[in-house]
Image (cartoon, rainbow, N blue to C red):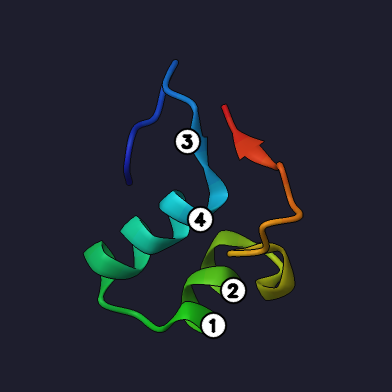
Amino acid sequence: MMDFTNSPIDVNSYVAKYMDEMGCSFEQACEDLGLEASQVFNRQSGEEFY
């Protein structure tokens, strides 16, 4: 698992990196990470992981 301790990263970057490292689809990445697909790559969302 990726370690982002003390490193803020936005949801889009997190999902994109997860897809790249795991070799999975966007839908699978969202499911694995427990995210709503509609909230990812949505410019209206300011959500971030810390």
Q: Which residue is under mark 2? A: 31
The amino acid sitting under disc 2 is: Glu
Q: Which residue is under mark 1? A: 27
The amino acid sitting under disc 1 is: Glu
Residue pictured at 74% horizontal, 51% vertical: 45
Q: Which residue is under mark 4? A: 12
| Residue in the foreground of this view, choosing between 37 and 32 | 37
Front label number (1 vs 2): 1
Task: Confirm or deny contact between disc 1 and disc 2 (CB under 8 A).
Answer: yes
Q: Distance between the residues labelled 3 and 2?
A: 19 Å
Residue pictured at 40% horizontal, 84% vertical: 25
Q: Earlier in the sequence, mark 3 or mark 2?
A: 3
Q: Is residue 6 above or below residue 48?
A: above
Residue 47: x %, y % from top left: 70, 42
Residue pictured at 32% horizontal, 42% vertical: 2
Q: Distance between the residues labelled 1 and 2?
A: 6 Å
Task: Confirm or deny contact between disc 4 and disc 2 (CB under 8 A).
Answer: no
Q: Dot 3: few (<14), some (14–19), or many (≥20) neighbours within 10 Å?
A: few
